[in-house]
Image: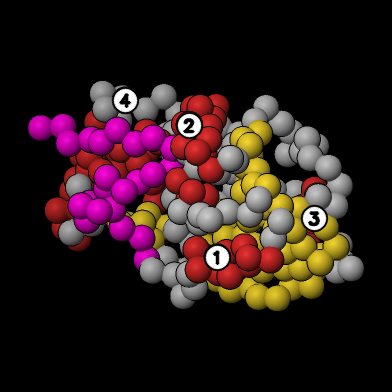
Amino acid sequence: MNNEVNITGWDFSKLTETGRMNETPLPWDYHAIVKQYIPGAGRMLDMGTGGGEFLKSLAPLPPETYATEGYAPNVKISEENLKPYGVKVISGYKDSELPLEDNFFDLVINRHEYYEAAEIYRILKPGGFFITQQVKGNCDDTIIELFNPEAKVEFKDWSLAKALNELKNFPFEIIKADESVGFTKFKDVDALISYIKVINWLVPEFTRERYLDAIDSAENIIADNGTFKSTFDRFLIISEKMK
């Protein structure tokens, strides 16, 4: 029996709420941290909003709230989800040339999305805050090693140290920096396949038929260990653009 689930945006609740997929708990609460900074913000940007699921969970939002989304399948989903909140969704942009004004935002948040430090500095007002939770470059190594071992992984060297070094090229004050080692755990192979189909750059053009051997290996790992564990190390940075 095929027990895959249809996932839209970055909403994995159909897997997490049933316990079929779970992540190592973080030593910080990104949602709570962002909520602390919203009251002082007139303009906020959520970078890489996905389907807008996380952003709408932060409501009430600042008077002017924007979101970017570069993954085409998510754009319409985010527009529909965020329209009731008055959020303007921006798509079709270059990461190095965001179609946003200089010194515009009081708060920029970024959860697991690529960014360029120079653009963050440009679009933030002096005294504005940049809060990001990032995934380390070793993310999903276990999946790649099993399903796509010849893959050339982009941003393999992405880490807290590298992110801090990039921000230090600009006058940012680092308020908090932390990192956590962890895993995403899948209790059945169909949950793993559902995840792979959403994070489709891990195993391009995935089909069950093409990856029967890898699926069998994953099933054996689950039978032996109870779960299939995929690397999911993350780090957090809270920074302020100096006046």
Of the residues shown, which amino acid type is indicated by label 4?
Answer: Thr
Q: Is residue 174 visible?
A: yes
Please say if the residues under marks 3 and 4 sit with CB atoms less than 8 Å apart. no
Residue positioned 57% across, 60% down in the render:
133
Element at label 1: helix
Name which of mark 1 and mark 4 comes first in the sequence.
1
**Residue 213, position as x, y percentages in the image:** 25, 34
Residue positioned 50% across, 42% down in the render:
52
Residue 197 part of the magenta-drawn span: no
Rendered image: mark on residue 80: 2
Q: CA distance from mark 1 to mark 3?
A: 18 Å
Point out the image quarter for the C terminus. bottom right
Rendered image: mark on residue 124: 3
Name which of mark 1 and mark 3 comes first in the sequence.
1
Q: Is residue 102 left or right of residue 223?
A: right
Magenta region: 1-24
Name which of mark 2 and mark 1 comes first in the sequence.
1
Q: CA distance from mark 3 to mark 2?
A: 27 Å
Of the residues shown, which amino acid type is indicated by label 3?
Answer: Leu
What residue would you read off at disc 4? Answer: 207
Residue 9, image quadrant = top left
Rendered image: mark on residue 35: 1
**Residue 54, position as x, y percentages in the image:** 48, 51
Residue 7 part of the magenta-drawn span: yes
Residue positioned 53% across, 35% down in the render:
83
Name which of mark 3 and mark 2 comes first in the sequence.
2
Element at label 2: helix
